[in-house]
Amino acid sequence: MRIAVFGLGYVGSVAVGCLASQGHSVIGFDIDETKVAAINAGNSPIIEPGLDRLIAEAARSGKLSAATGAEGKLDSCDIAFVCVGTPSADDGQGNTQERMIL
């Protein structure tokens, strides 16, 4: 299965590593070029036990890649996960500004 994951923070990074380790082709998206570069170099952008190994193996095998933009890259995806933060605004409502950037 070809899977897209939006957001390469704590949730998204673990998701891409685990999904790719199960044999899926995964592409991760983030607006942070540092996180994208880390994934593409086979490194985890977060500290999580065992994740460096999963990401390194997946990147080396070609099962995992990352990009800052999704233009033209979603057509072949079977499913997409949105793993971006939803901080609360001052009035208690969810601030969905980060989702709109995607």
Image: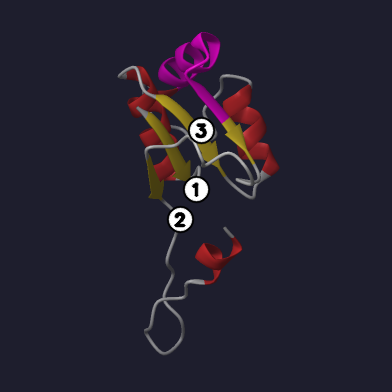
Q: Secondary structure at mark 3?
A: strand
Q: Position of residue 97 (x, y in %)?
A: 54, 71
Q: Is residue 52 above or below residue 72?
A: above
Which mark is drawn over residue 67?
none
The range drawn in magenta is 52-65
Identify the residue shown where x is 34% and y is 17%: 23
Q: Position of residue 102 (x, y in %)?
A: 57, 58
The residue where tag 1 is placed is 7
Q: Is residue 55 left or right of residue 79?
A: right
Earlier along the polypeptide chain: callout 1 or callout 3? Answer: 1
Q: Nearer the viewer, residue 70 or 66?
A: 70
Q: Mark 1 and mark 3: span between their CA atoms? A: 11 Å
Which mark is drawn over residue 84?
2
Type of amino acid under label 3: Ile
Q: Nearer the viewer, residue 34 or 76?
A: 76
Q: Does residue 96 show up magenta in the picture? A: no
Q: Does residue 58 show up magenta in the picture? A: yes
- Other-residue count near label 1 (Cα within 10 Å), few / some / many at <14 / 14–19 / ≥20: many
- Other-residue count near label 3 (Cα within 10 Å), few / some / many at <14 / 14–19 / ≥20: many
User: Where, by quadrant of the figure, is residue 12 drawn?
Assistant: top left
User: Where, by quadrant of the figure, is residue 22 drawn?
Assistant: top left
The residue where tag 3 is placed is 27
Type of amino acid under label 1: Gly
Q: Mark 3 and mark 2: span between their CA atoms? A: 15 Å
Q: Nearer the viewer, residue 17 or 25?
A: 25
Q: Among all residues in the image, which is located at the extreme front?
A: 75
